[in-house]
Structure formats: structure tokens, C-alpha cells
Amino acid sequence: GEDVEQSLFLSVREGDSSVINCTYTDSSSTYLYWYKQEPGAGLQLLTYIFSNMDMKQDQRLTVLLNKKDKHLSLRIADTQTGDSAIYFCAETSAANRKLIWGLGTSLAVNP
Amino acid sequence: EAGVVQSPRYKIIEKKQPVAFWCNPISGHNTLYWYRQNLGQGPELLIRYENEEAVDDSQLPKDRFSAERLKGVDSTLKIQPAELGDSAVYLCASSLVLESTEAFFGQGTRLTVV
């Protein structure tokens, strides 16, 4: 079945760049997403990328997609303490239109 | 514009008791989702509605869980009777159409079964 994997933890210093990585198995993925979840809060869509793109930039966020390797990354430039949260990678396919989620990467930003 | 509203935010019940969660999606959103999120896990889809029709309830434990979306707007999710393993955060989300690129999530209801 479909699977999405992420590393569980990432720690960076304030002002550095953060790179969160994700791999997926579904070759028919149509959209890939990055969601942010702060403590006690719901999930907030940060950005998404269509599978025929290889890069998308939105202010401090850069998403890179390597479809051949089924690898997705989220780069946060100039990471701030307010970026501390859990980041979920998710994908959906045209086949079943279900969101398949990773376990989330907990980002800790140290002053 | 108001987001997805869920209530209650927190609920503590004893095992074998019933519990219900309520969700008010964003106005005009046809698709509504209920997810369960265990600690340290990603969300797990329980049921997905297109208007008032449940189009995917394959992951809903139907022996104790039920859901309804009367009139295709608000939705309730019920557990009866609750078990210790049901402790989790229950998230509601809505999107404009089923193939929408964005689902908006509520803040969730944190259920603790003791």
C-alpha cells in the first residue's frame, strides 16, 4: 500500500535554514502537501506541489520534488522560534483521492 | 471568514460511556472529513462525506463509531461505548470539493478515556 516516511526530529538554530525530508511510495501521487501543526492546534496547510512540478517557492518556504526518487523536501529559510512545530508530509493520488500522511517531523528551533 | 469549528475542545469520560463530537465546516464546503490522530502519529481518516453522503467510511470502526451529516452541513461523530484505546484527538476538516487541493482543519477535540 501507499506509504509516506519522514524523519521524526530536527533541531536547528534560529536564523539557520531547516530542511525537512519526506519519501513516498505511491507513483501515482498527484498532489504533495506540507502541513504544520503547533501544540494543541489543528493542521495548517503550509504549501503543496503538483506532481508535474519540481520546485515551488513561497516566501521563506521552498518545496523540492524529485519524482524519480519519490522524494519531497521543505526548506524553511531564516528559521524562527515560531516555526517550532510538527511538520507533516502528505500525498494524494488520483486513484483513491485519499490523503496519505507521514508521522510528522518535530522541528525544534533553538535561540 | 470563520474556519472549521469543533466542539468540545476537550472531553474526559470513563470507559464504556458514550461521547459525541460536533463539527461545523466552512460555509459552502461540500466535503467533510473526520480524522483521528494518536499521539506521535499522523491523522487517520475515519470517514469522508460528500454533502450528506458518506463516500468513504472504510476506516470507521462501525461496531462503536457512528457519524452523520444531516443536511450536508454540520456533522457529529459518536462513540458508544468508548474504550481506553479511543483516547486521541479527533479532527474535522472540510474542503470545497472532493478533489480540492486544500482541506481546512479544525482545532480538534482531545478525548481522554479513563
Image (tube, coloured by chain):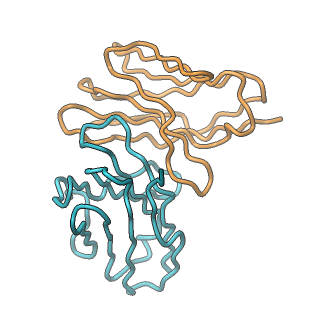
Chain colours: A orange, B cyan
The foreground one among B90 and B113 is B90
In the displayed structure, A108 sits above or below B34; it is above
The foreground one among B39 and B35 is B35
In the rendered image, the residue lying farthest to the front is B1
Q: Is residue B20 left or right of residue A1?
A: right
Q: Dividing the picture into quarters, in which one does residue B71 lie?
A: bottom left
Q: Position of residue B109 (x, y in %)?
A: 48, 66
Q: Dividing the picture into quarters, in which one does residue B98 lie?
A: top left
In the rendered image, the residue lying farthest to the right is A111
The foreground one among A13 and B34 is B34
- In the rendered view of the protein, which quadrant contains the C terminus of chain A? top right
At a point 71% along the width and 40% down the height, the residue shown is A82
Q: How many marks?
A: 0
At a point 49% along the width and 72% down the height, the residue shown is B8
Q: Dividing the picture into quarters, in which one does residue B22 lie?
A: bottom left
Q: Position of residue A43 (x, y in %)?
A: 49, 47
Q: Position of residue A27 (x, y in %)?
A: 26, 23
In the displayed structure, B87 sits above or below B105; it is below
At a point 31% along the width and 15% down the height, the residue shown is A52
Q: Position of residue B11 (x, y in %)?
A: 51, 76
- In the rendered view of the protein, which quadrant contains the N terminus of chain A? top left
In the displayed structure, B63 sits above or below A97; it is below
Q: Is residue B31 left or right of residue A73?
A: left
At a point 31% along the width and 81% down the height, the residue shown is B80
